[in-house]
Structure formats: structure tokens, C-alpha cells
Image: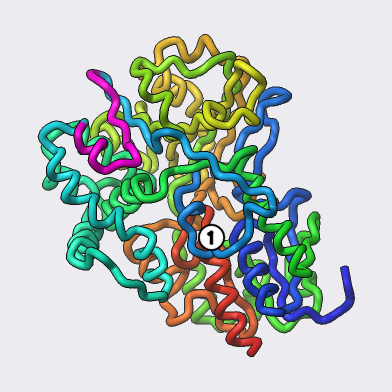
Amino acid sequence: MSREIYDAVVVGAGPNGLSAAIELARNGRSVCVLEAEDQIGGGARSGELTLPGFVHDLGSAIHPLGFASPFFRSLPLAEHGLEWVHPPAPLAHPFDDGPAVILERSVEETADALGPDAKAYRRLMRGISTDVERIITTLLGKPNLIRHPMALSSSALRASRPARAFAESYFQSEKAKGLFAGNAAHSFLPMEERPSAMFGLVLGALGHAVGWPLPKGGSQKIADALASYLRSLGGGIHTSVRVRSLDDVPRARTVLFDVTPRQLLDIAGEHFTPSYSKALRRYRYGPGVFKMDFALDGKIPWRDEECLRAGTVHLGGTLEEISTGEAAVARGDHPERPFVLLAQQSLFDETRAPDGKHAVWAYCHVPNGSTFDMTGRIEAQIERFAPGFRDRILAKNTMTTIDLESWNANLVGGDINGGLMNLRQFVARPVARANPYSTSAPGLYLCSSSTPPGGAVHGLCGFMAARSALRYLN
């Protein structure tokens, strides 16, 4: 590495770290990124986990917030190799009896399949879907003209409620309740805890407004495009450089950390005030995931073939079943029938598997740090809605929470969101502080998903942290 004094060094080459570096570089600052692993990308990496020719997403897979991200949209990522693929339908949610519910891009078409809840669904989703992109930028402190302010304020009040209470008060049918619960379960919260309803609303609205797309060639392509653009701006990236203390960081005016509070304390804790260190130690991590990847010799044989139109499939049936499973995880148990999130990218991206074959990505929620093998339970949930699935498995790979943390230190105990997203840590993330990205040590910043707006691949945590660092540099 160069002996020059950088304006900024970023520790961690995940999407947020790369985004922070880009924002600094495009504002004329000298910056380099240090990555502990030999491959950039953090939670957005891809590779051959099962058989040659099968490209699996090692971490994240489907990216509605990545596509909607106002920061990503401000970058020429297409010129650097990023191509988004939109399945015909964002989401399918099958049931034991009758057809699956399909979240279509159209609010009207989705509502038409919800029977007695059609009118309620239209009333709920029309306004927020129209304004969801403006809502995202408004939350980032960039006010925009909201075309449906009453719908927004009404939705905000509802979003603060637990998902179960919301669904039971708003919908009549099990299908509408189940669809909403599946989206809300992305919160990793019990359905009886606030603000789980917010996730149900926002993810549904994103499906209608922008879709739930996937990057052609794998999630690695997001990281590769960010890195390519950063290099075009003069930024440097160094892999296989593990930072254990500030002594391992080149001389710089500012340092930004794409790590969680636990690693931040290990690396720089001696530079923080006792009160800030104490607050970081109180930070809570959420449930983990047990992840599986499959190589199949054909498409998943869904009982309802409409599921083949969707990039993502939620396997959990009814609101009651999903609520029971998520409550078990919160208690430290492993549900017999876990809520399974499944992505079938190779149906829409031919680069993911050999001709006639398919790659499938799936996970379920488990207690943080769990080593329990959920293979049989995940496969049983898929087989339940797709009889004959097991017969099509050519190879599979499993990752426990411990495996995931070994692969990416930011996934503490298998937590893929960078920390619990309960109401307290949604409002104060990682600590109650006017500027959540600054630390108590001048020039040191946190830019990971442990800062607002939290988990998912969107680069917004890195972007906002970089804006804070730029004010310091100026």
C-alpha cells in the first residue's frame, strides 16, 4: 500500500463500505478500502457452492432496496457491469389448499386474487406504492413532494403496530393475512412485536413500485460494479488485509468502519469514551439464519405452477403458522415448520446454472448462534408445496450461523441484518446519538448496516456515513 496520507480509509469492502468510499472519492477525497477476505463484497458475494457451473449467492440474493436505492441510482453502475433482472412476479406465497397468492407488480391484479380483501388491499397499497421511492429519500433527510400525504401518514401509524395485530384487524382471508405475514417476517421479529408491520408494508409496496429484482450473474456483480466505479474515481481496494487495531490502518484523516459494534469495539474501543463504549456493548443482535443452496436437475415442481413466475417464494402458509414459527425462534427454539425464504434465480438468469439445471437459494430463521441442523425441516417445507422436490436435488450446501459468521465476521451469530431491528434499535441504531454514524472519537465513523437505515444491500448506510465524514474533512 502507498505511504501517502489518505483523506479516508474504509475498513470493509461490503456494499456499504464500497458506497462510503465512492461518495468520498466522487467528492474529490483520496480513499482506500481494506478488506480482510480475498474477495470483495461482504454479504454480496457469489460462488460455486455445490457443483461446477452452478452460481450461488453466498449471502444476499433478491434486492428490491438495491434497485430502489437513490444512492445506487445516482451511480453509473450499468456502465460497470450491473444488470438487473426482473422476474414476471416479485413474490409467490403458496398455501396447502387452493392456489398460491402472487404479489404482482400491479396492485390491482394482486388485489383481484384476494377475494373479500381486494378492496382493503387496494386502499392500503395504492398510496404507499406510488410514493415508496419518495418515502425512501425523505427518510434520508431529502424531502420530496408526497403525492398521497394522507396515505403516507395513515400507513406510518399502521406500520408502528405489530404485524399480527395489523393483519388480523385489516384483512379477513387467510391468504391476505399470510401474504402480509410473509413480508413482515423479513423483520426477524415475532409477529406480535413492533414495528414488524412496517416490513410487511414496505416490502409489499416495493414489489409493486419497483419489483424484487436480482443481479444478472449473481449478487457479486453489485460489489464488482461498485468496486469498478470506485477504481475509476481513483480509489484503491486492498484485499486480504485484516484490521485488528487502528495500528493496522494506513495514515488517514478519517477512518470509516463497515463492521458491527462488536468488531468496532475490538478494533478501536480504546479510543472511545466509556459511555459510548458501554452503549455499543448494549447493542443487541437478532436471530440468525440457517442457509441452504441446491443444485437441481430441473425446475422446482411446485403444486401451483404460478410459483414459477416469481423470483422469491415464501413458504410458511398461514399467519398463524408464521407467527408460531417466529415466536419459537425468539424464545430460542427451532420451529418444526420454519418460515422459509426461497429464491429461484436461475429461472430468469441463464448464467446461474447449466442448461436444463437450476440453482436454488433458501434460508430459515434460527436463534442467534444456533448450530442446529435445519436441513430436513427446510426440505420438508419445500416438499410440502412442491411434491417431488427432493428427487431433483443433485447436490446441496448448508451453512449454520457459525459457518456464516466464519465466512463474514459481520454476520454475528448468523444475524444478516447487522443487529436486531426492534423498535428501539430502529430508532436508535447503534446507539441513541444525534449523528448515528459518528463515534465518540473524532474522525472515526461507523458505516455498516448497524447504522440507519439498517440491513439489505442498498449502500445507504455507507453513503450517509460518508456525508458525515465529508463535513468533518471540510
Where's residue 304, x and y in %? 34, 18
Residue that badge 1 annotates: 73
Q: Is residue 352 left or right of residue 292?
A: right
Residue 46 vs residue 266, the one in the foreground? 46
Q: Amino acid at mark 1?
A: Arg
Residue 332 seen from this side: yes
Does residue 340 appear in the picture of this structure?
no
Residue shown at the point (66%, 68%) measured from the top left: 22
Q: Which residues are magenta?
A: 97-112
Q: Residue 208's x, y, as percent?
A: 34, 46
- The quadrant the N terminus occupies is bottom right
Describe the element under mark 1 as helix, strand or loop: helix
331 vs 54, left or right, is left
455 to the left or right of 441: left
Location of residue 112 by image quarter: top left
Residue 314: % across, % down: 37, 33
State the residue at coordinates (63%, 48%). 82
* Residue under the image location 40 percent in, 31 percent down: 313
Quadrant, the C terminus? bottom right
> Which residue is depicted at the point 16% across and 50% down?
123
| Residue 91 part of the magenta segment | no
Quarter holding residue 130: bottom left
User: In the image shown, does 241 or 453 lie closer to the viewer?
Assistant: 453
Mark 1: few, some, or many residues within 10 Å (few <14, many ≥20)?
few
| 423 vs 62, nearest the viewer | 62
